[in-house]
Image (cartoon, helix red, strand yellow):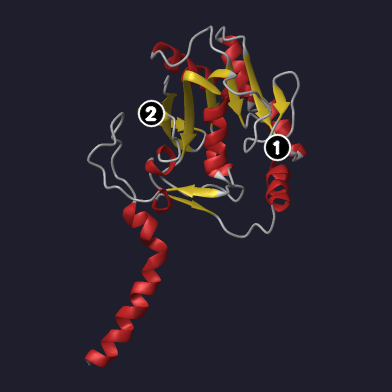
Amino acid sequence: MKQLLKPFFFLLSLSLLPLLPFLLRSRSYPGVSLANQISTSPSAFLQVRPGFRSYDDYLKLQLNKTLNPRLRRIWSTRDWARKVSVFSRFFADLRDAGFLSNNSSALCVGARMGQEVAALRALGISDSIGMDLVPASPLVVRGDFHSQPFADASFDFEFSNVFDHALYPDRFVKEIERTLRPGGVCVLHVTLSRRGDRYSANDLFAVEGVTALFRESDLARVRKVDGFGLDTELVLRRRSA
């Protein structure tokens, strides 16, 4: 009997390996402090999806969605007012909390049609622009979030809800910190409750999967949100020194 059980438990352990990230997933939202958390590799909380043979293949997948005529029509018509309204509430709350001001120079990373930028400008934050693989003038300029087309320390505030689309999450974060001014704020909307769609390039299982990538910033706030399928807002501030 023991001889039969050994291979059974061995096969069972192998079948559970894919579930390891979910078993390790954080169940709490510690806010500012990550003290007393179990120290572990970010790879336990963030996994890049396999299957991309080249960076061009990755870009083609992203552009399949971004250039879809039907989706672009929906984004610019039916969805426009609703998304501007929701983003306006998010940004107004961030301004009330002191993370954003009317004098901020703001960048929206992965802005597609630019509803985020329209919301910022409607709130009086006129020095704001979006960036995406496909430009949408006058609100969005062309740019790849793995290599932003901006000089160091260009912005006081950066917002993105496309972290899951980053094939190289470390580069995504590094570019944000490079283009943020000291004391500047980065706000990310991410999902922890489910896998992203087929256009996602990574899967996030806990906030530590993101915060561990920020080498020059501190976590300022974590809260639950309802942001077009994304459920968690992370606010990070770049250190001044």
Please say if 214 is above or below 99.
below
In the image shown, does 38 or 134 lie closer to the viewer? 38
For image coordinates 59% across by 10% down, the residue present is: 122
Please identify the quarter of the rendering in which residue 136 is found: top right
Q: Residue at x 73, y 48 (%)?
A: 60
Q: Name the residue nearer the viewer: 74 or 212.
A: 212
In the rendering, at what x and y percent does residue 183 appear? Answer: 45, 18
Q: Is residue 149 above or below residue 210?
A: above
Q: Is residue 129 left or right of residue 35?
A: right
The tag earlier along the polypeptide, 1 or 2, is: 1
Q: Which mark, by number, is residue 218?
A: 2
Left or right: residue 108 versus residue 10 is: right
Q: Which residue is mark 1?
A: 71
Residue 65, percent from left and from top: 69, 43
Cα separation between marks 1 and 2: 36 Å
Q: Secondary structure at mark 1?
A: helix
* Quarter location, residue 131: top right
Tell me whether the residue at label 1 lies in contact with that at label 2, contact meaning CB atoms closer than 8 angstroms: no
Amino acid at circle 1: Leu
State the quadrant of the N terminus: bottom left
